Image: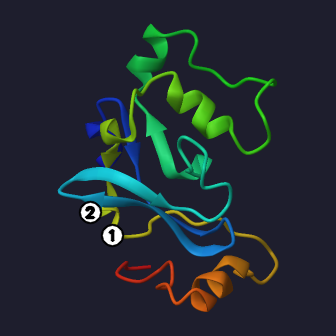
Amino acid sequence: FQMRKIKKVGIWPVGLVGGLKVEKPVVQDGKVIGFNSMWAPQRPYPIDMAGFAINLDLMKKNENVKFSFDVQKGYQESAILSKVLSSAQELEPLAENCTKVYVWHTRTTDPTFPYEVVLQKNKKPASDRGIEV
């Protein structure tokens, strides 16, 4: 239901990804102001592929919005989003302002969270603090 409202690109948290319990955009006053991503956080859009949707009309109008085999590993999301956005502030936070997790990466093995240990060692909050999972 929420995806129908997307004008350009909707975004939401993803659970059990990137070595964290939750990888999510940081939202303030309804705008994305950053990301809590530990895997290659320098990416223009450090978002998992399961964490966003692009309005189909936007893709139909711009035939350059497609996957490329020439993109560095882990940068496919940033590459495609850079073709439709000029900044992260254009992202449309869904899942109640990115405070709820409705999407998870699942595997048949127990999840590991190596970056949660890094956060703990650096006296930073856990990735799932303040979010309903």
Q: CA distance from mark 2 to mark 1?
A: 6 Å
Name the residue rendered at 17%, 57% in the picture. Answer: 29
Where is 90 relative to 47, above or below?
Answer: above
* Percent coordinates x, y for residue 110 in the rendering: 77, 84
Task: List the residue tagged with mark 2.
Answer: 96
**Which quadrant of the figure has residue 68?**
top right
Circles 2, 1 touching at the beta carbon (< 8 Å): yes
Amino acid found under the numbered disc labelled 1: Thr
Name which residue type carries label 2.
Glu
- SS class of the residue under badge 2? helix
Is residue 24 left or right of 3 when viewed as pictured?
A: right
Name the residue rendered at 41%, 83% in the picture. 129
Q: On the rendered structure, is 12 left or right of 15?
A: left
Q: Nearer the viewer, residue 14 or 26?
A: 26
Q: Is residue 120 shown above or below 59?
A: below
Q: Position of residue 69 (x, y in %)?
A: 81, 25
Query: How many residues crowd mark 2 within 10 Å: few (<14), some (14–19), many (20+)?
Result: few
- Relative placement, left or right, of 75 versus 60 is right
Q: Which dot marks residue 99?
A: 1
The answer to whether residue 1 is visible is no
Q: Position of residue 115 (x, y in %)?
A: 67, 77
Q: Position of residue 18 (x, y in %)?
A: 67, 65
Task: Between residue 92 and residue 33, name the one nearer to us.
Answer: 33
Q: Secondary structure at mark 1?
A: loop
For the C terminus, give its image quadrant: bottom left
Which of 75 and 93 lies nearest the eye of the viewer? 75
